Image (tube, coloured by chain):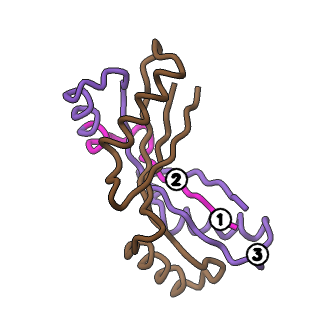
Chain colours: A brown, B purple
Amino acid sequence: MKAKVFVALKRTVLDPQGQTIHGALKRMQYTGVSEVRQGKYFELTLQDDLDAGAARRQVERIASEVLTNPVIEEFTYRLEE
Amino acid sequence: MKAKVFVALKRTVLDPQGQTIHGALKRMQYTGVSEVRQGKYFELTLQDDLDAGAARRQVERIASEVLTNPVIEEFTYRLEE
């Protein structure tokens, strides 16, 4: 089983890296984009003997305690076979 | 419309950052994880006057020309209302 964890800055936190990318896109004539925000993406391969409930608990703990800075970031995740 | 773009290292490319996180997880007694790979995640907010086809073309060009280093990385994306 795999877990895909997406970590992004909270909406209220300024994202200068995303703004820089957005500025570059505008200079390159990509006019259809009105905002860019950058985050991180983690793919965790889980051991096969974990059931879905245990996997969910473990991924939530890892995401909140290790992968995310809860002051400025938030995460979502998805389990896949 | 929003586009979520996920950029990850190709499978054949070593991911020392992911290995470091995996090592940290093992030391912290998270035993259910057998591999970690880290990537990037971009959320593009698209202008409302783009139809789905144009959005798809634009996002694919941005992802392949700006957000991804095609030598070592590959991307997937998803459009959301």
Depth order, front residue of A80/A27: A80
Q: Chain of mark 1?
A: B
Q: Horizontal placement of B79 versus A60: left or right?
A: right
Query: Which secondary structure lies at badge 1?
Result: strand
Q: Are callouts 1 and 2 both on one chain? A: yes
Query: Which secondary structure lies at badge 3?
Result: loop
Residue designated by label 3: B50
Q: Residue at x 22, y 29 (%)?
A: B28
Q: CA distance from mark 1 to mark 2?
A: 13 Å
Instruction: Kindly indicate the quadrant of the structure image that contains residue A42.
Output: top left
Residue designated by label 1: B2
Circle 2: is it few (<14), some (14-19), or many (20+) Cα within 10 Å? Answer: many
Q: Horizontal placement of A21 versus A29: left or right?
A: left
Name which of mark 3 and mark 1 comes first in the sequence. 1
Q: Is residue B47 magenta?
A: no
Query: Which secondary structure lies at badge 2?
Result: strand
Name which of mark 2 and mark 3 comes first in the sequence. 2
Quadrant where the image shows the C terminus of chain A: top right
Residue designated by label 2: B6
Q: Horizontal placement of B35 versus B68: left or right?
A: left
Instruction: Kindly indicate the quadrant of the structure image that contains residue B77.
Output: bottom right
Which disc, if any, is residue A3? none
Instruction: Kindly indicate the quadrant of the structure image that contains residue A8.
Output: bottom left
Q: Position of residue A48 (x, y in %)?
A: 47, 15
Q: Residue furthest left?
A: B27
Depth order, front residue of B55/B57: B55
The amino acid pointed to by label 3 is Leu
Region rendered in magenta: B1-19
Q: Residue at x 61, y 67 (%)?
A: B61
Q: Position of residue B51 (x, y in %)?
A: 80, 71
Q: Chain of mark 3?
A: B
